[in-house]
Image: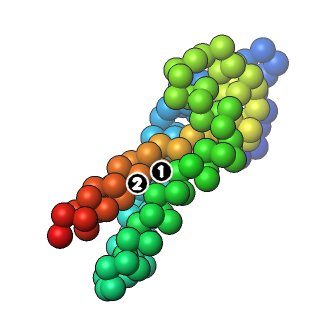
Amino acid sequence: MLTGGKSKPPGETFPIPYFKTHLPRFEAELKYCELTYYALKFSPTEPLHERQDFLLRELGRRNRTIADSPDLYYYILSGRTDLDQSLFASDPDLAASYATIIATFLALERYHAYLQEQFSELIRS
């Protein structure tokens, strides 16, 4: 538990920027490294069509993940803040789970760009 097992006094809130931006960015870096490692380790080198199939399958990860939490994805993408208090300041465990989902979105956005670059290189060769 992020609060050391202690609950906050009534009326005191948890830091929204921590759960909405700082923690997700940190976790996203780790997730991105895991994803690129996975792609490097498990992507077939030959034949060409198998590598293309792998890259196309991996490119679909982002959309499949967005489909699991589309409201949160578009809330974060839009830059809205009207739900921040209820999402990130009421319950630290819930806020941490939202932070993890946001981190996954951020990592998958970078991973998607990485895969597109890999796919472009494959087509050029």
From the viewer's perspective, tell me whether residue 35 is left or right of residue 17: left
Residue found at the far bottom of this picture: 46
Choose between 99 and 18: the one closer to the eye.
Answer: 99
Residue 109 placement (x, y as % from top left): 44, 45
Mark 2 lies on a secondary structure that is helix
Distance (Cα) linking label 2 and label 1: 5 Å
Residue 43 image point, x, y percent? 39, 77
Does 78 sit left or right of 34 as displayed?
A: right
Residue pointed to by mark 1: 108
Instruction: Residue 37: name its quadrant.
Output: bottom left
Q: Is residue 23 visible?
A: yes
Q: Secondary structure at mark 1?
A: helix
Q: Nearer the viewer, residue 47 or 63?
A: 47
The residue under label 2 is 111
Q: Position of residue 50 (x, y in %)?
A: 40, 79
* Labelled disc at residue 67: none
Structural crowding at the residue carrying mark 1, measured as other residues with C-alpha within 10 Å and reported as few (<14), some (14–19) or many (≥20): many
Quadrant in which residue 89 is drawn? top right
Residue at left offset 46%, top offset 58% = 59
Q: Residue at x 52, y 57 (%)?
A: 60
Whether residue 15 is visible: no
In this view, the residue in front, 124 or 1, is: 124
Image point (32%, 79%), residue name: 48
Looking at the image, do the residues carrying marks 2 and 1 touch, with CB atoms under 8 Å apart? yes
Dot 2, how many residues are within 10 Å of its Cα: few (below 14), some (14-19), or many (20+)? many
Q: Amino acid under label 1?
A: Leu
Query: What's under tag 2, amino acid-wise?
Result: Tyr
Vertical placement of residue 42 versus 62, above or below: below
Q: Position of residue 95 (x, y in %)?
A: 68, 35
Q: Quadrant of the C terminus?
A: bottom left
- Residue in the image at 41% along x and 66% along y: 55
Q: Is residue 90 above or below residue 94?
A: above
